[in-house]
């Protein structure tokens, strides 16, 4: 067979597989059913599940969580009060007793726990429920949505869009283009290879089979939302009738969240089917604004405007660099002054009618425009350098202590060690509210301290006002917001999260679980926070995991062993400086660490691109210990 024909067959086979995949996507689409007659009768399905049905089974949208928030208020788990004319200023007031009724569903409990974690004195503003980390916001939302989908499947209202049988069909069908591509590579390789390299084409064919079939399987198995069921279409039609009944009330779309105390559960269901526009507009359960942040410092809620200094080069720098910059400016000023002396004096014919005498003294040498400009520049540089040195010295010896609530922490400045290395953060912004004003300016926090505190913590910081650099940080009280802004693992895909919520996939947790994967004890969020850059994880069998940057550069590897082999593993890994208080034993070096807890041993190794996380190794090992 000629190579041209082999390539043509490979192209046709690949196109046929793509066509089969497209056909399956087409026949598994869900369409909105014909609405039932308008009715005010609510069904037993929770609003978040109703939102999934109203979205034609694709997946829950942002209104699902907001509808659940309103529904819990309608069921009297808390009250929503609006003190003024603007619904955005509404507050949640937790109830002192648990209302009677069926137990909360997992996603309802997740939302209520979030509200309780954020509340201060049983009160939390609606807009204070936002997250202060984009990764954590995504993680919380993914788990909430997965629990909603799992409940819809339990009720028989939904199913996976691409079934296991269809995935198997696509995976098996992927063998055809894999063989065609592999055979084309075989012909190409054997035709052009040297005599001593004959036979290498079969190796290329084998790898192409492996790569193409794996790719087809991954594409087929990727989660692509839900699909309707006969019962689901029947229930969705009824809820569309409820939607039409609610939409028939002219004022319903303009009801604020506090109206739930009058409309009970109707407002939550209205949000689920997208007719409670004003109520959902006043709610935000996603990512918050770093420029206007809620603070509960002092026992009462208020919004604080935060400014983040970025322009002036002195902000966040240590004293040594500030003094060095001053000395450089001082030296440049003297160099410019010396250069100005080499310029020629101005001559009388150049001066013209200008009088170059001053008190009987000839000043023609200073009347030269070039000399005047260079003298002025030299004066400015010398003055600037002296000012910088003096201010940095005074700033260094006069630190100020502040106590307040951490509002925001994020990466400010990063540097790259080379073309093949990711940017390494060396300075973070930290905004602290000391309760004296409703405006504050963020400070420069050394990146190695960024993991010491979280938003909501009460801290005492020692700062230098002129350079706005934090030189000491102590956590006085951990805030309830730690549970709100951290701890959501987003390393799993949505399908695995749904299976976990259904109980069909056991998520390893605890010492007694032998099948716990290495990637489960150290999340991508933990590593990303230590590195200061987005991170992805790739499992290498059950005992290894590789953490990489978005462009595939390795930053860290974790290895885990349990059982009898763990003792041998620990004997080899036990080196470096002991770290007390983490697990049963922990050791740390400049490039990694090891921890033993129970019968589990975990070794964390930092690659070259992840060495910036070395100061955070105790925190990373502590995170591992909590999950073993």
Image (cartoon, rainbow, N blue to C red):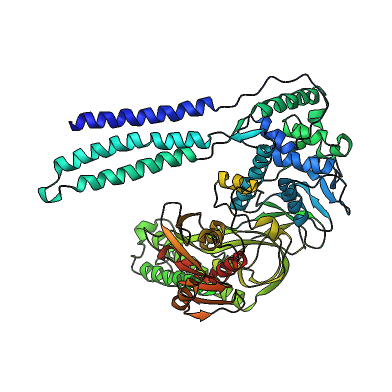
Q: Which x, y percent locates residue 561?
A: 49, 67
Question: Can the viewer see residue 359 in this picture?
Answer: no
- Quarter containing the C terminus: bottom right
Picture residue at 56% right of the left edge, 33% below the top: 161
List the single residue furthest toward the front: 564
The image quarter containing residue 32 is: top right
The image quarter containing residue 30 is: top right
Picture residue at 78% right of the left edge, 26% below the top: 242
Of residues 410 and 324, which is closer to you in this image?
410
Q: Is residue 184 above or below residue 199?
A: above
Picture residue at 46% right of the left edge, 63% below the top: 556
Of residues 125 and 195, which is closer to you in this image?
195
Q: Which x, y percent locates residue 208?
A: 30, 43
| Residue 228 located left or right of residue 85 | left
Picture residue at 42% right of the left edge, 72% below the top: 331
Q: Is residue 194 above or below residue 398?
A: above
Q: Which x, y percent locates residue 395?
A: 61, 74
């Amino acid at each position: 067979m000629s190579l041209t024909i082999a390539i043509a067959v490979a192209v046709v086979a690949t196109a046929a597989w793509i066509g089969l995949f497209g056909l399956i996507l087409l026949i598994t689409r869900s369409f909105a059913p014909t609405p039932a007659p308008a009715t005010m009768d609510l069904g037993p399905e929770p609003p978040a599940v109703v939102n999934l049905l109203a979205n034609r089974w694709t997946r829950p949208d942002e209104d699902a969580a907001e509808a659940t928030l309103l529904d819990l208020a309608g069921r009297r788990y808390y009250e929503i009060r609006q003190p003024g004319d603007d619904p955005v200023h509404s507050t949640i007031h937790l109830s002192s007793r648990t209302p009677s009724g069926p137990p909360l569903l997992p996603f309802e409990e997740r939302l209520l726990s979030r509200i309780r974690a954020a509340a201060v004195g049983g009160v939390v503003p609606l807009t204070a429920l936002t997250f202060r980390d984009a990764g954590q916001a995504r993680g919380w939302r993914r788990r909430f949505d997965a629990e909603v989908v799992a409940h819809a499947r339990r009720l028989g209202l939904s199913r996976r869009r691409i079934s296991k049988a269809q995935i198997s069909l696509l995976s098996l069908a992927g063998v055809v283009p894999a063989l065609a591509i592999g055979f084309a590579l075989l012909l190409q390789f054997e035709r052009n290879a040297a005599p001593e390299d004959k036979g290498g084409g079969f190796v290329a064919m084998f790898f192409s089979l492996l790569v193409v079939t794996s790719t087809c399987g991954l594409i087929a198995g990727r989660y692509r939302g839900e699909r309707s069921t006969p019962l689901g279409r029947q229930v969705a039609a009824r809820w569309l009738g409820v939607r039409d009944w609610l939409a028939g009330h002219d004022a319903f779309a303009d009801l604020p969240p506090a109206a739930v105390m009058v409309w009970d559960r109707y407002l939550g269901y209205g949000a689920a089917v997208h007719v409670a526009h004003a109520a959902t507009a006043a709610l935000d359960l996603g990512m918050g604004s770093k420029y206007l942040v809620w603070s509960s410092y002092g026992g009462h809620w208020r919004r604080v405007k935060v400014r983040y200094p970025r322009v002036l080069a002195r902000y966040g720098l240590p004293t040594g660099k500030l003094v060095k910059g001053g000395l450089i400016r001082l030296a440049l000023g003297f160099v410019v002054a010396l250069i100005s002396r080499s310029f020629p004096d101005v001559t009388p014919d150049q001066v013209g009618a200008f009088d170059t005498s001053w008190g009987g003294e000839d000043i023609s040498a200073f009347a030269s425009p070039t000399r005047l400009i260079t003298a002025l520049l030299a004066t400015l540089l010398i003055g600037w350098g002296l000012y910088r040195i003096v201010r940095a010295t005074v700033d260094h010896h006069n630190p100020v202590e502040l106590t307040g609530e951490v509002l925001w922490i994020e990466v400010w400045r990063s540097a790259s060690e080379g073309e093949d290395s990711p940017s390494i953060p060396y300075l973070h912004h930290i905004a602290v509210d000391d309760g004296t004003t409703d405006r504050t300016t963020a400070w420069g926090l050394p990146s190695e301290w960024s993991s010491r505190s979280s938003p909501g913590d009460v801290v005492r910081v020692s700062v230098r006002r002129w350079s706005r650099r934090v030189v000491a940080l102590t956590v006085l009280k951990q805030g309830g917001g730690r549970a709100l802004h951290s701890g959501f693992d987003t390393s799993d895909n949505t399908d695995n999260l749904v299976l976990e919520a259904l109980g069909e996939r056991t998520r390893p947790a605890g010492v007694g679980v032998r099948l716990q994967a290495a990637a489960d004890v150290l999340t991508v969020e933990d590593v990303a926070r230590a590195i200061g850059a987005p991170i992805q994880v790739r499992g290498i069998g059950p005992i290894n995991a590789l953490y990489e940057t978005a462009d595939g550069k390795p930053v860290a590897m974790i290895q885990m062993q349990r059982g009898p082999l763990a003792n041998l593993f620990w004997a080899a890994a036990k080196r470096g400086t002991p770290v007390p208080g983490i697990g049963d034993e922990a050791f740390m070096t400049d490039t990694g660490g090891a921890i033993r807890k129970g019968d589990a041993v975990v070794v964390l190794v930092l690659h070259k691109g992840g060495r910036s996380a070395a100061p955070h190794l105790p925190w990373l090992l502590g995170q591992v210990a909590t999950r073993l």
